[in-house]
Image: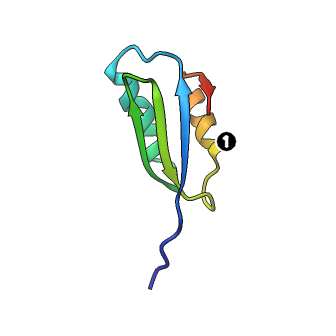
Amino acid sequence: METIKDLKNAKFQLETLTCPSCITKIEGVLNKEPGVENARVLFNSSKVKVQYDEEKVSSARLAELIEKVGYPILSS
């Protein structure tokens, strides 16, 4: 029987998002990362919310992935 792990939540404030394809790009790269349970981009507020398993991925790695696809993080 598999033990259910406590997931961590990370929030990242981005610069203003300009188009819906930004959402697809960011969510796509995050949701492919091992350890990410769910990633959502809130277009109107330019925020990213991620649920993740900290034993498999760090919040620093999540931030790195977001910035790597071209979206600077203002705060987390």
User: Given the current orientation, which residue lies at the most extreme right position?
Assistant: 60
Q: Which residue sits at x=49%, y=78%?
A: 3
Report x, y in % for residue 23: 38, 28
Report x, y in % for residue 70: 54, 22
The quarter of the picture where residue 59 lies is top right
The quarter of the picture where residue 19 lies is top left
Residue that badge 1 annotates: 60
User: Given the current orientation, which residue lies at the most extreme front position?
Assistant: 45
Query: Callout 1: 10 Å neighbours few (<14), some, many (20+)?
Result: few
The quarter of the picture where residue 68 lies is top right
Relative to 60, 21 lies left or right: left
Total marks placed: 1
Quadrant (top left, top right, bottom left, bottom right) of the C terminus: top right
Q: Which residue sits at x=46%, y=80%?
A: 2
Q: Label 1: state its secondary structure.
A: helix
Q: Is residue 69 visible?
A: no
Instruction: Please state which of residues 73 and 61 is positioned toward the viewer in this rendering.
Output: 73
Vertical comparison of 60 with 17: above or below: below
Amino acid at pointer 1: Ala
Q: Give the color scheme: rainbow, by chain, secondary structure or one colour.
A: rainbow
Q: Is residue 21 visible?
A: yes
Report x, y in % for residue 34: 52, 55
Relative to 6, 41 lies left or right: left
Quadrant (top left, top right, bottom left, bottom right) of the N terminus: bottom left
Report x, y in % for residue 65: 57, 36
Q: Which residue sits at x=47%, y=15%?
A: 16
User: Given the current orientation, which residue lies at the most extreme left position?
Assistant: 20
